[in-house]
Amino acid sequence: MQTLEPSSSGVQQQPYRGRVRSGCLTCRSRKVKCDELRPVCHNCTRLKRRCVYKPRKNQQASGAAPQTPEQLTPDGSDDITATTPGLGQTAEVELASQQYPSPLSEGKEIGFIQGIPLDGEFSIADGTATNPFQSPDSSIVDITARLEKALRQDAISGTTDDAEFEPASPTTLISRDIELTTTIDVLAIRELPLQPSVSFFVESVDCPAIALFDAVNWRRMKAQVAEVGMNNEAVAEGIVALATLYKGQMYGLPLSKAMYLYQSARSRYEEVLADGNQDFGVVLITAFLLSLFDIVQYYETVPLLRESSEMFLTRLRAWTQDQLPSSSLAMRIVAWLRLLHVTTLRGGGTGLVSEDVYELFSSCGESMPNIASPLNDPPDTSTHIYEMLTTPIFDFYFRLQMISGEIAQMTHYHRSRTTGVDQKDVVEQMAHVSARLHTLWDNRCATQRQIPEDLRAHLAPKVADPIIALVGMANAAYHAEFIEIGRVLGDPISKSAESRQAMHHLREIVDGDWNAQEGGVLKTGYLRPLFLYAIECMDKEENQWAVERLEKIKNPICRSDFFAAFGRELSEAQLRKERRVTSKFFCMWYFGVPPPFL
């Protein structure tokens, strides 16, 4: 028989009766006493566990009643299940996912960005502390274990020795599992929207026009920008907007949320720009992130820097005139923005930045110091060798793109071409451009002069293979400019000797030993050269070859499938008409949209 033990005060204590109906679900699952402190009990605070309370019956029944602390989730936000009568579990998740608050609008008073500390110690590689979906929750594990036990027992008798919970049938346990799962996951999407976006940004966001040709600096940029985003809301919102856009493009998801986040990030950018105490480097980073968004979501947004405010011009002018050395990250971003501006001039585009901004960017000179590697990165000899050998190759590619921008400015989209005087002027300028292209080629670095066999003979495969791929893409980009020149000049199709020779070299590279393919997928760096090849040749077999190669490029960010279809239809129209067809106007007529940037 159970006896009562006297307490130290001499007063008899009541025996433990089991069936504790209060306390948080986490303590109940652990079978420990809960002090029921709201919104987070002492045990969960001490052990850094997720603290979840089950809504009381009287609270569930009175959805319209004023909210109390017991109706709030641990993060202090309104609990959907407690305040929305009749809302099902599926509807809860859908409602939570459709609410688009500003990503960083909550939690500022306690030093957190939606559950992420702002002390600079956050790591995107942290385990369960930063990824609520990485490990099972203790409450769910407990319910699952009890469900398995109940299923092994007689479904009718179904008794249990658990003192914390009443005996429950499998159906009751399943309902509890659904309730716990949904509640915890809804809390997770509210508390940590930034961390998955930062991880995706660092691991998956790549701008083909930059990342393919400046891979090391692109990776280091993302790491540094992610660090800045941990302490700056404008940068963080830019990261979230860009990551959401890339996810939508990559997986075919609706882009309405990405556009909402973009507008929110632009508003935050304006606040940072107006703050004279804010370092201009942060302004530049935020502008760069939003410009990357503009590049992908072409013609859906007005590029941020194309209609730049007087405030931005004033601050940019002061920054370029400052005698202090600028950071390598800022200088690299300026160079990349100039490169992206060229991309948006081609095909009749209006450009990414205004003339005033581009002129100030150009005044920074050609200096492009490499971004320093993170201090906590272990020494990597292969990365150091790759960086050393590829730096002059990117310099070649950058200078090539600056010349490409001049070629784009001489098309009929950007200047008059309706008189003989106009044409004569363009021919003279193109002759000068061609001479500069040949000089650039003659001065290319020693690494770029090697053939694949020589590079493999002198370098380890870990270094040789990506360098071979880079050299192949840079050489293809060079030959593509001569195809473009032939098209801009307007001579009879395929009659230009340099254009025909450039096509021959391009075909040799793509079908040669330049690591142009990986796993049957052609590298995105060949998209523009192959598209120009497809729309400039007047031979059915050659056109078919180019279109087939375009179809091997699988990159939704730069719309490779669209360009394959565009190249096929435009070249067939030219073959039927036996003349060049204006690419921009054909795209608008046939597909109903202006051509994407290329």
Image (spheres, helix red, strand yellow):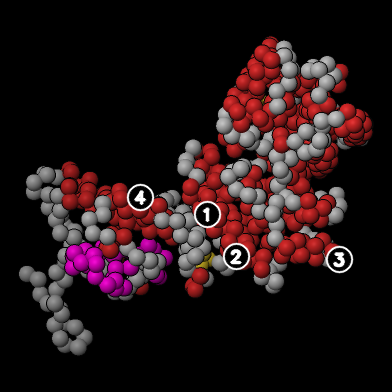
Quadrant assignment for the N terminus: bottom left
Quarter assignment of residue 205:
top right
What residue is drawn where x is 65% and y is 22%? 570
Q: Amino acid at mark 3?
A: Gln
Q: Position of residue 265 (x, y in %)?
A: 57, 58
Given residues 176 and 304, the one toward you in this image is: 304
The residue carrying mark 1 is: 261
What residue is drawn where x is 69% and y is 15%? 577
- Residue lying farthest to the bottom in this orientation: 9
Near mark 3 (Cα within 10 A), the count class, few <14, some 14-19 or many ≥20, is few
Q: Amino acid at mark 1?
A: Leu
Q: Position of residue 557 (x, y in %)?
A: 59, 38
| 254 over 432 or under it: above or below | below
The residue carrying mark 3 is: 323
Say which element carries label 2: loop
Say which element carries label 1: helix
Residue 231 numbered mark, or none: 2
CA distance for labels 1 and 4: 18 Å
Say which element carries label 4: helix
Residue 67 located within the stretch drawn in magenta: yes
CA distance for labels 3 and 1: 36 Å
| 559 over 313 or under it: above or below | above
Magenta stretch: give its range: 43-72
Residue 240 numbered mark, or none: none
Residue 94 numbered mark, or none: 4
Query: Which mark is nearer the camera, 3 or 2?
Result: 3
CA distance for labels 2 and 4: 30 Å
Q: Is residue 396 visible?
A: no
The answer to whether residue 97 is left or right of residue 556 is: left
The answer to whether residue 542 is left or right of residue 136 is: right
